[in-house]
Amino acid sequence: MNSSYSAQDKARIRHQLAELAKAATFSSASQLVSLLTYLVDAELDGTAHELNQARIAIDVLGRSAAFDATTDSVVRVEAGRLRSKLRDYYLAEGSADEIRFEVPKGRYNPKIHFAAAPHSPAATQQIRLLKRPDGTSLAYAVSGKGMPLVKAANWLSHVEFDHQSPVWLHWWRELSARYRLIRYDVRGSGLSDWDVEFGFDTWVEDLEAVIQQTVQGKCALLGISQGAAVAIAYAAKHPERVSHLILYGGYAQGRLKRDCTEAKKEEALTLARLIRIGWGSAHPAFRRVFASLFLPDGTPEQFDSFDALQRVSTSPENAARFVATTHHLDVVQLAEQVKVPTLVMHAKDELVIPTEQARLLAKSIPNARLVLLEGRNHILGEAEPAWTRFLKELDTFLAE
């Protein structure tokens, strides 16, 4: 039977399949790569409609001609494993792939999807690398036009992956549609170098370097979560470079600075151990603990994406070091030195950072405005009313 794919399409598909086979997700799954390749080849040759369990078992999985699908479930099991691997891959390394492969449940003829052309400002981001004096490479992304808005890096980021993620995509799409958005991966994570030393001072210095590289004159500065403390330190040190300071979900004091009871210390140590044990595990149970804290009202798709982001953003050791560093942050005195217009926003029922920290920031920064949003998610979802208000408050503030 003739194939409906052109020679050019076949070449593109086979190239994409070869790139998938090189990915970390499939590095220890050669049999699944062979299975996917076999199925895709049949689709390209126009013979996929002839596929059945017996042919797959004999041709790919090493079974004999006596294979009996009623007593041997190997094909169904391997197909299920392949579907799971494909889902993980497209939530991580393959998030930006132009061609995607799908093996529908109950079928063995695969679907091959060609991505639509980019249609939003967020899809046009440009990623570059910035070399620091100590040799560390920092990855930063620029998208949109207009007033420069720089996001101080937080500890869980990947400028390429979260650009496609349902957890973050609406943030970058909307902000890029309004402003020239600049964001970067903190050293030790994302596309920046991982095998490096880091601490609060280096985080601030890296923000200085990114702004120096990308902005002439003043910029608006956005600090989210741990990035709020970094943004505060920069604004206090360089008021001449900051037109507006926006802090969302941030804190002035880390966990062990705002509460040093023995119970809290033990909780912090337990969290660090949990990260070291479970962050890189193939099983999502450990990482789901964090997803349930950051996105208690998240969708299943967001949970899956947040789980994948944790795995691709950094190593278990770096994740534990990041958390240990944030536990000891205290920027109250720096906040008192900030002289630029400041807007503090916070989801008042979120589980990660207590609302008292937002109040402390607003009280410590002279003339800061505090806006408490309805919601429980640390990362605002696109469907939340709080997201619409966040954008409205941000736009109004930056127009002043």
Image: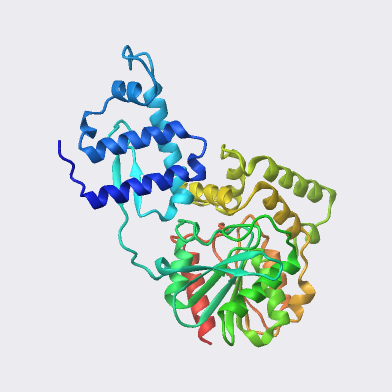
Outermost left residue: 1
Between 379 and 376, the one lying in front of the other is 379
Write down the quadrant of residue 55 in the picture.
Answer: top left
Q: Is residue 386 visible?
A: yes
Q: Quadrant of residue 277?
A: top right
Q: Is residue 276 left or right of residue 244?
A: right
The tally of labels here is 0
Q: Is residue 265 above or below residue 374?
A: above
Quarter assignment of residue 236 = bottom right
Percent across and percent down for residue 179 are: 47, 78
The N terminus: image quadrant: top left
Q: Position of residue 254 (x, y in %)?
A: 75, 61
Q: Position of residue 280 (x, y in %)?
A: 61, 43
Relative height, residue 284 to residue 61 (above, below): below
Q: Nearer the viewer, residue 258 or 313?
A: 313
Q: Residue at x 37, y 32 (%)?
A: 35
Q: Is residue 22 above or below residue 258?
A: above
Residue reaching furthest to the top: 66
Q: Residue at x 49, y 46 (%)?
A: 304
- In the rendered structure, the answer to whether residue 333 lies left or right of residue 247 reads right
| Horizontal side of residue 201 vs 71, given as left or right | right
